[in-house]
Amino acid sequence: MKVLVLGSGAREHALVSALAADPVVDAVIAAPGNPGIAATALCEPVDALDPEAVTELARRHSVDLVVVGPEAPLVAGVADAVREAGFACYGPSAEAARLEGSKAFAKDVMAAADVPTGMGRLCTTLDEVADALDTFGAPHVVKDDGLAAGKGVVVTNDRDEALAHAESCLAKAGGAVVIEEFLDGPEVSLFVVCDGTDVVPLTPAQDFKRVHDGDEGPNTGGMGAYTPLEWAPADLVDDLVARVAQPVINEMARRGTPFIGTLFIGLAITSRGPKVIEFNARFGDPETQVVLARLRSPLAQLLYAAATGTLGQHPDLRWSDESAVTVVIAAENYPGTPRSGDPINGLDDVAEVPTAYVLHAGTAQQEDGAIVSSGGRVLSVVALGDDLGQARERVYAAVDRISLDGSHYRTDIALKALRGEIA
Ligand code: AMP
Ligand code: GLY
């Protein structure tokens, strides 16, 4: 099988590695990929957001499966275009990807499918915003209705800050915001592989969204993750399949827009049970890096089954008993405009740490072969261990071997879980 993977982050690096490890796969092509991915896949400098260019690329390589990593190509209709051209594609149509692309659409589907979620109100004027903020009270949750790469959400006790964020979102053409009830409790990410009708859940992971230790500072795309979640209720996955994933997939099919791809359920485990915070229409980054680190079933066969509507016959997934932790190394000033072009040293030394490896995200290769930073999240370092403690020791030992001027990373990934401090 030949697989084309769209995207250029550490999530895509993890996907490419797992796909290439599937015995049925003889080649992986990535567009555009990155210098880390280039070690495993043929990287083609094609714009992943251009439906025609991607279709042409799929034809040129006669691929058997297209896997879409990030949300932007989905919203741009890339999955529709390649599917129309006859290629099996793992990734939802633009219409179905609105589950992620529009917070208001997601709330509408959740209401129709009776999915447990917080209360929310769509606002298009500052007066409506002020009214909603006062109705729900602090902490205030203000979300840009459109896509914002994980940075469109402000959670704050400061009413003025909440209003200011809403004002900047409303200032955009067609701007709208969703004001939500604050959901208290630990957050979980669950990826559910969907073929339009059937669903197969992967294992839950936890992501660390804030830039600094102790969940301080602004939201980012994600600074680290770990799995499994030993503190989570034993029936969590079954419960989420029954009350969230299957009803949503049924509702999307009923609307004539079947969802094929990853339904990413972001939820909070509140005192009143799990409640959905958001959906994404793709694998999460950096959770994918740890979830795939533990997956023992062949990934290409799973995603091909989803793309071709045969998940119902897919064998049960197999998982390693180990724990996996990933730590993101970010460039100076991320999540603001990151500094780039700095040399990254020590990448090869990571191999000295058992099980540890480096996935590339914002990296570039210079003509002399040197790897330099070229984005906000630069690297995602992954390690496995017999338990979380060992996985954490290994991943931080690996992070220590890497040097990048001005970079920063969180030192507390998976720490609360290790200490039993998550209730
Ligand atoms: P989202 O883009 O919707 O995932 O939001 C980004 C992050 O903001 C989430 O991972 C949460 O940490 C936080 N957040 C979003 N909505 C809520 C909410 N209703 N209650 C509490 N925290 C939230
Ligand atoms: N890590 C969360 C996301 O991918 O949106």
Image: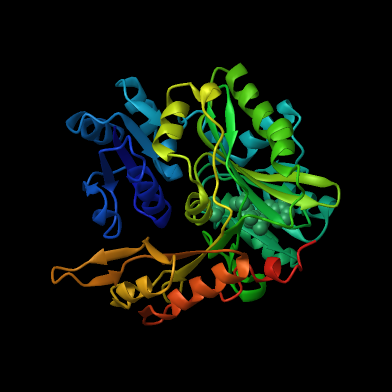
- Tell me: 79 left or right of 313: left
Query: Looking at the rendering, in which quadrant would you find the C terminus?
Result: bottom right
Residue 353, image x and y in percent? 42, 73
Q: Nearer the viewer, residue 262 or 132?
A: 262
Q: Nearer the viewer, residue 338 or 55?
A: 55
Residue 90, image x and y in percent? 42, 32
User: Where 393 sits versus 126, above or below?
Assistant: below
Residue 311, image x and y in percent? 52, 25
Where does ligand 1 appear, by image quarter?
bottom right
Query: Looking at the rendering, in which quadrant would you find the N terminus?
Result: top left
Q: Quadrant of residue 373?
A: bottom left
Q: Nearer the viewer, residue 404 or 297?
A: 297
Q: Quadrant of residue 93?
A: top left
- Tell me: 147 left or right of 367: right
Q: Is residue 148 visible?
A: no
User: What residue is drawn where x is 66% and y is 28%?
Assistant: 246
Q: Nearer the viewer, residue 153 or 393?
A: 393
Total count of labels? 0
User: What residue is drawn where x is 77% and y is 45%?
Assistant: 274
Q: Residue furthest left?
A: 367
User: What residue is drawn where x is 28% and y is 71%?
Assistant: 372
Q: Is residue 341 visible?
A: yes
User: Where 320 sits versus 400, above or below?
Assistant: above
User: What residue is drawn where x is 62% and y is 59%?
Assistant: 165
Colour scheme of the picture:
rainbow
User: Where 151 sits versus 368, above or below?
Assistant: above
Residue 98, image x and y in percent? 54, 34
- Tell me: 307 left or right of 254: left
